[in-house]
Structures are given as structure tokens and as C-alpha cells.
Amino acid sequence: MQTAYLNGTLLPLAEARVPAMDRGFLFGDGAYEVIPVYSRRPFRLPEHLHRLRHTLDGIRLANPLDDAEWTRLIGEIIARNDGEDQSVYLQITRGADGKRNHAFPAHVTPTVFIMSEPLVTPPPEQRDTGIAAVSAPDVRWLRCDLKTTSLLANCLLRQLAVDTGCVETILFRDGFMTEGAASNIFAVKAGVLLAPPKNHLMLPGITYDVVLELAAAHRLACEVRDVAEAEARAADELWMTSSTKEVLPITLLDGRAIGTGTPGAVFRQMYAWYQDFKQTVMRGGG
Ligand code: PMP
């Protein structure tokens, strides 16, 4: 049985209920985070809570809890759910008002929800042979740096991948690569790792930071700069990164091979660094 937290109460997940007038339900008016847990330790919790604050500030919603209280509640949820490795999901919405009105209600209590699911890492064949991706214009709004629950565009874009037998959709805006429907995207050209810069057009991924830190620690040549669509399509390697997918090689884009059409040497190196980091640092709570 999964245990969740809802508005001050721990309860079975199946029994968690929110009112139909909740603005999260009516408007997608909320913020969320997904925190991977390794060996029952939340990975980079301060960084996730920092990103949560950035989202809440961006949507003008006061943080209902301080970091100490978030840390305590997340620890409680991890302890009460099965599995050494978990994926903690938390969400805050602007709460339920008596009427449906786009403008914020004057007085309303935010809804706070936390749950945990098993952390499922990608099947080994995705790492060994690479994954197929499809591309699409990035039709989302201009605050993609905010991790809000208004995810309809991301859902439609990810479904496009599923409908075309792919794992991810790579997004291009105004001739440049932004990110994936639910991941960040890196390119490799002539041994140099290329990463789109953090700005309002992409989510600042925690895994994105880890990959850049590992690149710096191992002196892998790296450029954080805009990546043109043509450059991405002509790259030697493309990778997708996220907390749950970790680092995966994209070997096919829109049915055309990326590089040799197999996972590249730089990917294999980064994957090994990432797994080593996971064993030593993530499982140690770093
Ligand atoms: N971009 C988008 C749009 C995402 O939804 C995610 C998370 N699934 C990411 C990037 C990767 O972020 P993280 O590494 O923190 O999981």
C-alpha cells in the first residue's frame, strides 16, 4: 500500500481526494517536483527545493512549507513506502475556492500533496542500442523554466513520440533545440559536448547539472550555448537526460540515424561516469 501526504495528513494513496473546485484541477494552477531517491536518500533535495521555490515565485504562490518541513515530510513519505529506490512526487496547487474565476482568490489555502512511486530506470536495451526520437515545434509557453502542473503541451508532445514508436520528442523553437517533452537534450560534435543554456525556454534539469558537472570533473570539452536545429540533426551523438531516464542515447531522429546510428563513445563514457557517481555519491546522499 502506498502512503501519501495530503494537507497535513498521511493516508493511503488510494484514499487521497481533492475537491473538484481545486485550481489545480480547474486550471492546472500549481507547481510540482519529482525527486529520485537512491538507497532511501533523496538526491539533491536542496536543489529540488530551490527549483520549487523558483517555480512558486514565478507563479506567485507562497511556499506553504519551509525547507526543513519539506525535508521532514519527504523523509516520512520515503520511510513509509516500499523500495530502496523511489521517485517522490510533490505538488502544490493554489487550492479550492468556491467559484471558478481565473484571477487568484483573495483567501485560499494551497493544496499540498506528496506521494512516492517505485523508481524505474530505463531497460538496458535502451542504453545499449539507443532510442528513437521524433521532432516537433516547441509550442509551449515562454516560461518553460517553471515546473508547473499545466503540462498539456508536454503531454501532447510526449504522446506524439508514443504514436510514432519513439521514446521522446525533441523540441525546436525558432531554429534552435530547446529540450525534450520531458527531458533535457545534449548534443556531441567532434568530441565536444553541446548543452543549450538554461533560460526561460527550458526546464533547468537536475540531471542536466549532474552531466555538466561530470563533464567538467573529467575534463570533457563542453560548450553551453544555443544549439541550432541543423547542428542537432547533424550531431555525432544526441542524449536525453532526466531524473528517471538518467542519460540515454538517441540514435534515430525522425527516422534518420544520428551519427553512426549506435550509442557513441562519448555517451558510453558519460554513462559510466554517471553510474559510478550514482553508486558512490547518490547512494551516499550527495
Ligand atoms: N525538461 C522537462 C520538460 C522535464 O519534464 C524534465 C523532467 N522530467 C526535465 C527537463 C529533466 O529534469 P530533471 O533532470 O530534473 O528530471
Image (tube, rainbow, N blue to C red):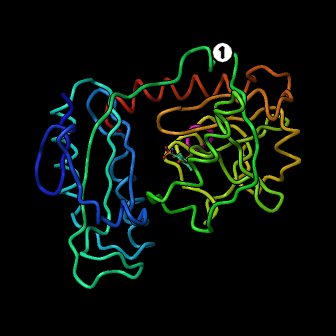
Point out the image quarter for the C terminus.
Answer: top left
Residue 97 percent coordinates (x, y): 25, 74
Residue 217 in magenta stretch:
no
Label 1 CA crowd tier, 10 Å (few <14, some 14–19, many 20+): few
Residue 218 percent coordinates (x, y): 62, 34
Helix or strand or loop: what does disc 1 sit on? helix
Position of 160 with respect to 174 (left or right) is: left
Instruction: Write the start and end of the magenta stretch as one range.
Output: 212-216
State the residue position of label 1.
128
In this picture, is 256 found above or below 43?
Answer: above
Q: Which quadrant would residue 178 be assigned to in this image? A: bottom right
Position of 140 with respect to 7 (left or right) is: right
Residue plotted at (65% across, 24% down): 269
Residue plotted at (15% across, 33% down): 80
The front one of 136 and 143 is 136
Point out the image quarter for the N terminus.
Answer: top left
In this picture, is 154 found above or below 29?
Answer: above
In this picture, is 197 found above or below 232?
Answer: below
